[in-house]
Amino acid sequence: MELTFARGTLTDQFREEVDAFYQSVFGWSATDADVVGQRCHILLPDADQFILLAESGKPMDSPGFDHLGLLQDSRAEVDALLEACKRYREKDDRVQIQEYEDLVYPQLTVHAFYVKFLMPIYFDVQSMDRP
């Protein structure tokens, strides 16, 4: 996934702030890379996934609840990540959290919250529990 930002956004300080949150809360790693002549930042949730942060003259705009899903293995993992986000928000009020009631279906319960920090979209952190 590529997320685009206004030119001048991806400063060293911005990259450090992004890394501090996403590394400490989600355990992601990060690196810089030259992509088509531009110094970009890459978040690496795991060895097979990446989120490319790049600058653009037409940056991404998502004023609503557009999101990327982060599926967790259990309800407990979702709850632990929610608590980590809340703890981080205590020291940085730019962390936005949207909590949701469980979506309960006969064969599925979705347990989720949304979090947004310095990105143009939310991350939907959820588990899908089946009886």
Image: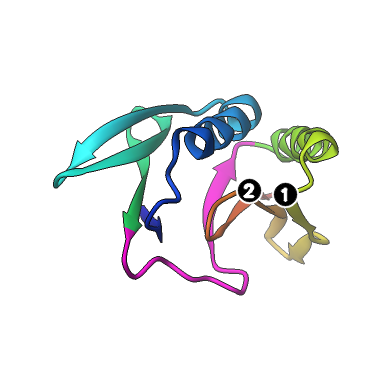
Residue with the mark numbered 1: 94
Q: Is the magenta stretch mostly helix, strand or loop?
A: loop
| Relative height, residue 115 to residue 105 (above, below) | above
Callout 1 secondary element? loop
- Earlier-in-chain disc, 2 versus 1: 1
| Amino acid at circle 1 | Arg
The residue at the point 53 percent across, 71 percent down is 62
Q: How is the image coloured?
A: rainbow
Looking at the rendering, which quadrant does residue 102 occupy?
bottom right
Tell me where the magenta segment starts and ends, as one range: 56-73
Kindly identify the residue that appears in the image at 31 percent across and 41 percent down.
40
Residue at which label 2 appears: 117
Q: Where is residue 89 in the image (x, y as percent from the top left)?
A: 79, 41
Quick check: 2 above or below 65? above
Q: Are marks 2 and 1 in contact (CB under 8 Å)?
A: yes
Residue at image x 26%, y 33%? Answer: 33
Q: Position of residue 47 (x, y in %)?
A: 34, 27
